[in-house]
Image: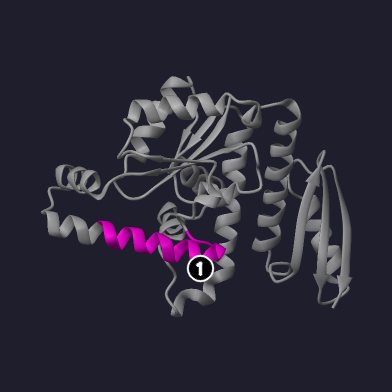
Amino acid sequence: MPLITVSRGSKSGGEALAHLLADKLNCPNLVSREVLVRVSQESGIHEEELFATMHETPSFLSRSTWGKRRLYLTLIRAALLEHAVNGCMVYHGNAGQFLLQDVDWVLKVRLIAPLSLRLTALMETQKMDVYSAKLYIQKVDEDRRRWVKYLYSESWDDPAHFDLVVNLKHVSMETAAATICRMADSPEFERTPERVLELADKALAARVQAALEAHPKTRDADLHVRAENRAVHLSGEIKRKGLLEEITRVAAGVPGVARVETHLTNR
């Protein structure tokens, strides 16, 4: 029951590949916008606002809302990790390679396709002329590059972020899917009980992180959250002593937390 993320440019065939992988792997957990729906239902945040967080590059004037954007990304990461805990998952939404970058056994795939193939797909589905289609693809790709650079200080399409890069110029979609499935079946990407427990701990840590980022008294604290066997460990710096009790209370209130251990220092 592997975990796979598929990164791609606009109209590069990523959605089709993800569906083919899910069919081949008998994997019902095919995830893209579904993770935003889940976060929206759980948090009350409008789905379109979450979608904008995952797709729109902040303008200079909107960068003051970084705290809110960081919270939304933490909630999305938590929901994605919880999807992963439940079994086989193929994720073809934005930034899977970064949202799950600390999970080594997730098979992170980058799909690229010739511009001609992308243009044809866009002209057929959106009824665009070739000039408009080319401008559209250039804009979407550039927006994604800027979005990743702003949030992660990384290059969106750097092959170092992926375990496998597939070029549809040289292989068919069927061959690409078969190759990915064979690689996903290797020991490096095997699901084990120990790895699932690690996923659950990461999901819990993300939930605690989100709770702390959402609370008005703790959102500005410089904290690192780690979970192990439902015990949450908090480290970092706080501005005042009275904040320690509030941080502990907020963390302990997250469902699933068994106990909280703090390793905090005062600035």
Q: Where does the magenta region start and end?
A: 137-155
In-image side of 100 versus 204 (left or right)? left
User: Which scheme is used to colour this image of the protein?
Assistant: one colour
User: Magenta span: helix, strand or loop, mainly?
Assistant: helix
Numbered marks: total:
1
The part of the image, by quadrant, that contains residue 147 is bottom left
Q: Nearer the viewer, residue 256 or 95?
A: 95
Query: Residue at left 54%, top 41%?
Result: 163
Where does the image place residue 158, in percent across and percent down from the top left?
A: 49, 55
Query: Residue at left 59%, top 68%?
Result: 67
Residue that carries the numbered disc 1 in the rendered image = 150
Whether residue 145 is situated above or below residue 23 in the rendered picture: below
Q: Nearer the viewer, residue 103 or 75?
A: 103
Q: Secondary structure at mark 1?
A: helix
The part of the image, by quadrant, that contains residue 220 is bottom right
Q: Can residue 203 be seen in the rendering of this structure?
A: yes
Q: Nearer the viewer, residue 16 or 169?
A: 169
Whether residue 133 is situated above or below residue 264 in the rendered picture: above
Where does the image place residue 212, in percent across and percent down from the top left?
A: 71, 60
Query: Residue at left 47%, top 19%?
Result: 26
Does the magenta run of residues contain 85?
Answer: no
Residue furthest to the front: 170
